[in-house]
Amino acid sequence: MCARFLVYEAIAISLAAMLSLGELTFSLENPAEAGGHSWQQPGTGPQKRDPQALFAKGQTALQNGDLDTAEASFRRVIAMDPGAGAAYSNLGVIAMRRKEWDHAILLLHKAAKLEPKMAGIRLNIGLVEYRRGNYAAAIAPLSSVLRDQPDSQQARYLLGTCHFLTEHYAKAVSVLEPLWPSMSSDFVYLYVLGNAAHSAGQTNLDEKALNRLVEVGGDTAQFHLILGKAYLNREEPERALAELERAERANPGLPFVHFNLGMASMRTHNDERAVAEFLKDIAIEPDLPDNYEQLGMFYQRMERYEDAEKSFREALRRDAKRPTSYFGLARIHQHRKKYQEALRAIDNALRLAPDSQSVHYVRAQILTNLGRRGEAQAELATVKKMLESSNAKSIETLGEDRVPNPELTKEPK
């Protein structure tokens, strides 16, 4: 007879609702006890207790950081009972600890199928999608957790951040604003909420968040960095420069200070300083793709196409899911009349940014150059429909008007 676990509670990684030095930080909560559940199979003596003992051994090993022992224990449990969803969930947690995100998501989806009522599994799925940069894919599982557990601060904070990063600003505000009583002293929360409110046109909340940010921030380098970012998003680059320079004086090696000084310098038309600041940040964070992407856009505007292409490729080498870099490469190939290469690049951009007006417009141009006029007309019709639905007077430019937020998405060290 196939043995069967009745129920086990999963060990879940929870999102710590804080950001330190601009990096998302996670902590492991103590796992819930698995007692009170029964294991039924024929036989007597030690055999009857083996599966529970193995599961408990795995839990203890996972708590103690002994991932190899934990993995072996949970795999033996699954060998006895392929329907043990909690064991699959804990194997997913082990993969998360090892930062094996693709493997983790497969295990967690298996666990969720076997234990659909276990909210901790869905929270972990959302967390893994976040860590993989799939912010849109994280929204559904996190939303389901919040429906089941409206008081889950971790799920609410992460869901609101995902809405923010996918540019659904009104949704971000509606999810994040209820956290105000418990998080209005956290200046990164205030930054995200205020920025979302600003982009959603909610002026009163924007001002409220900014005033509170100034009130609670203190005089740390991290605070001046975040306040500078807030001013950048409010299109006040001079005030942003002043705050970012304070952050630099307090801690010249603080990650993202020079990146944001570069952004502010671009917006004050100090191109020479912008390049210097991005290069300084590259020296501190050589694997941050945002620096290379911003340099690529700068070089492209300056018609330094070789430098621009190199920078965009460096960005994509570090993160292959950057539509702005593919878009930049498409424009470079288009300028060089290498239309097949341009089409391949713009198709990659379209796959990652299907709602971008500028991507559809440039694709129409490239298709026209290739003599594929019917497809080009279809793309232009798509652009027209987008403009009409948004009441926009001109085509939005991909990436150039956006202030990136790598502080919210960078992999913790």
Image (cartoon, rainbow, N blue to C red):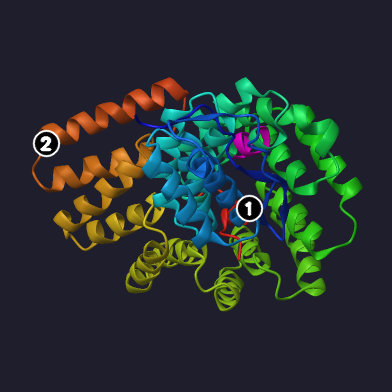
Please tell me how crowded label 2 is: few (under 14), some (14-19), or many (20+) other residues with Cα within 10 Å: some
Quadrant position of the C terminus in the picture: bottom right
- Which amino acid type is marked by label 1? Thr
Quadrant position of the N terminus in the picture: top left
Between 53 and 346, the one lying in front of the other is 53
User: Is 385 situated above or below 350?
Assistant: above
- Which amino acid type is marked by label 2? Arg
Between 61 and 379, the one lying in front of the other is 61
> Dot 1 corresponds to which residue?
60
Residue 157: in magenta span: yes
Q: Determine which quarter of the picture holds residue 371.
A: top left
At x 84%, y 39%, the residue is 184
Segment colored magenta: 156-161
User: Is 55 situated above or below 20?
Assistant: above
Secondary structure at numbered mark 1: helix
Observer-side mark, 2 or 1, equals 1
> Dot 2 corresponds to which residue?
373
Residue 167: in magenta span: no
Please tell me how crowded label 1 is: few (under 14), some (14-19), or many (20+) other residues with Cα within 10 Å: some
Do we see residue 1 in this rendering?
Answer: yes
